[in-house]
Structure formats: C-alpha cells, structure tokens
C-alpha cells in the first residue's frame, strides 16, 4: 500500500500506483507485474532497497533540538531565486517565521496547539521534506491586530508568492505542507472558530488535481464549522500552475 502526501486520492495498491502514473490499462499492468514472476526481469540487489517500511515516530525533543540551531532568515538564495524578495523575510507579517539551518536550507516551523515547535519543513533547490520526528500541523505567518482574512495554501512558497502578488495587510497566511491529515482537519476547524474577527477565507491551492482535492476537503471542514463568512477559491488561471509559477512569470 502507498499514500501520497500531496494528492488525497493518490493512494492504494501497486496497481493504483502504476495506473496513476502511466495511464496503463489493467491488462497492461497485469502483464508488467506477471513478468516479475518469471526470469526475464532482473531484480535489484537486496542491499539496494529496504524490505520493510520503518514507521516514523513523533520525536518533539529531536525537532526542538534541531530548531535551536536554526536562525531567522534575512535572505535566502533559493527563495530569492523563486522571486521571494528578502524584504519579505523581515517584514512584520513574516518576521521570525522563515529560518535557515546549517546546511542553508530554508526552514519553516510548525507549532502545535500549545505553541510548541512540532515540525520543521525544509526547502531548497534539491530538497522538500520534513525533519525526521516531525508531526506537521500548519506553517503560518504572524497575526496582527485587525486581521480579518485567512489565506490557505499548500506550500509556504505559494503563500509567500500570493502575498507578493496580492498584498493584504489584514490577512494571515497559512500552508498545509501538502495533503491534510485528520489531525490537521481538526486543528483547522478549531483555529477558524477561534478567529473571532475572521470574515473571509481564501483558498489558494494549485490549479491541478491535488489542488482541487485539497480545496474540496477544506470546504467540507468549513461547512462543518461555525464559520459563517465568505470562502473563496483563488487559483492560477493556467492548468498545472501554482502561485509561485505565476510570480516567476511576472518577474
């Protein structure tokens, strides 16, 4: 069995995995799989793969220890290559919400409902992952007095790009870090209901299947909440794009 952290519908058996990525028919997939029962397919050496999947356990002490070595970013080569201006790193909305580690990765911290660090999301030109021991919640910008809008995106870079494209001094920016878990769903509902001045929620998911799925899931969560304000989906017009793609095109 497999599960994609990006697409909520991208999960299942090896058959689903192949079909979702190749578009092959069931008979074609069966033929490919049956070949592994014969002698015409060279199997990888045992040392080249792990026979059992090792469960990832939440380790807040490890995450906190790593975070202590991180520093607030005042500039970052990779993020600036994606047209995320360094002036954004130190503005009141995002100050102390973007960090870097000793390997020059951009670090986006997630906090639990008690305000403790619970996950670290790393991003660089060759990296996009969570630190081992993380339990993701949401990355978010700073809150300020008078805020009445919540902007929800999939990736932190999408949220930062949206801020650059459509600045709003009354908006809080949030990123899910990919597909949402049941725990994140409960946290989102609680956060929305606790945001008493909230009037508008803007879903800035990607213009693709994963973005459609995430937007639908968030809308269902909001329908079951006490939020009575406006919910808007604002995705890029071009199929397959996210807001950073748009930002880079505009320069």
Image: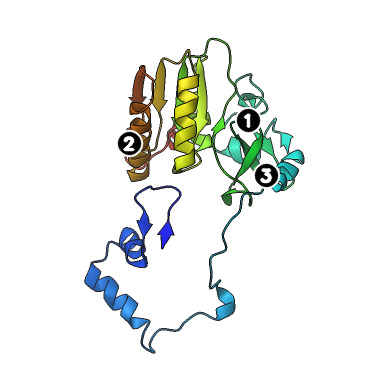
Looking at the image, is 243 positioned above or below residue 8? above
Q: How many marks?
A: 3
Q: Residues within 10 Å of mark 3 (few under 14, many from 20)?
A: some
Question: Considering only order in the chain, which callout, 2 or 3, is on the residue closer to the N terminus?
Answer: 3
Q: Residue shown at 46%/18% (left/top)?
A: 149
Q: Residue shown at 54%/81% (left/top)?
A: 45
Residue found at the very far top of the displayed protein: 146
Residue 216: image tag: 2
Q: Residues within 10 Å of mark 1 (few under 14, many from 20)?
A: few
Describe the colour scheme in one phrase. rainbow
The answer to whether any part of residue 166 appears in the image is: no
Question: Where does residue 59 sit, x and y in percent of width and height?
Answer: 66, 49
Residue 60: image tag: 3
Question: Considering only order in the chain, which callout, 1 or 3, is on the residue closer to the N terminus?
Answer: 3
Question: Where does residue 230 sit, x and y in percent of width and height?
Answer: 35, 18
As measured in the structure, the alpha-carbon distance from the residue carrying label 3 to the one carrying label 2 is 31 Å
Q: Tell me the element at label 2.
A: helix
Picture quadrant where residue 243 is located: top left
Question: Where does residue 28 sit, x and y in percent of width and height?
Answer: 25, 72
As measured in the structure, the alpha-carbon distance from the residue carrying label 3 to the one carrying label 1 is 13 Å
Looking at the image, is 47 positioned above or below residue 148? below
Q: Residues within 10 Å of mark 2 (few under 14, many from 20)?
A: some
Question: Where does residue 99 sit, x and y in percent of width and height?
Answer: 68, 35
Look at mark 1 in the image and give the residue it sits on.
114
């Amino acid at each position: 069995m497999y599960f994609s952290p990006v697409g909520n519908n991208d999960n299942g058996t090896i058959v689903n995995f192949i079909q979702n990525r190749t578009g092959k028919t069931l008979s074609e997939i069966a033929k490919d799989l049956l070949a592994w029962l014969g002698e015409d397919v060279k199997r990888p050496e045992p040392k080249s793969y792990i026979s059992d999947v090792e469960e990832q356990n939440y380790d807040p002490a490890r995450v906190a220890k790593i975070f202590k070595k991180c520093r607030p970013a005042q500039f970052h080569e990779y993020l600036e290559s994606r047209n995320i201006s360094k002036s954004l790193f130190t503005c009141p909305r995002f100050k102390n919400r973007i960090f870097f580690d000793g390997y020059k990765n951009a670090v986006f911290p997630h906090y639990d409902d008690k305000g403790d660090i619970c996950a670290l999301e790393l991003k660089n030109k060759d990296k996009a992952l969570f630190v081992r021991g993380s339990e993701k919640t949401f990355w978010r910008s700073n809150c300020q007095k008078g805020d009445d809008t919540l902007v929800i995106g999939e990736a932190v870079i999408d949220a930062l790009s949206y801020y650059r494209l459509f600045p709003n001094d009354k908006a809080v920016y949030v990123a899910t870090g990919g597909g949402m878990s049941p725990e994140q769903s409960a946290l989102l509902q609680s956060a929305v209901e606790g945001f008493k001045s909230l009037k508008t929620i803007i879903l800035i998911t990607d213009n693709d299947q994963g973005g459609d799925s995430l937007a639908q899931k968030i809308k269902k969560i909001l329908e079951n909440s006490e939020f009575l304000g406006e919910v808007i989906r604002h995705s890029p017009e071009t199929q397959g794009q996210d807001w950073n793609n748009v930002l880079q095109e505009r320069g």
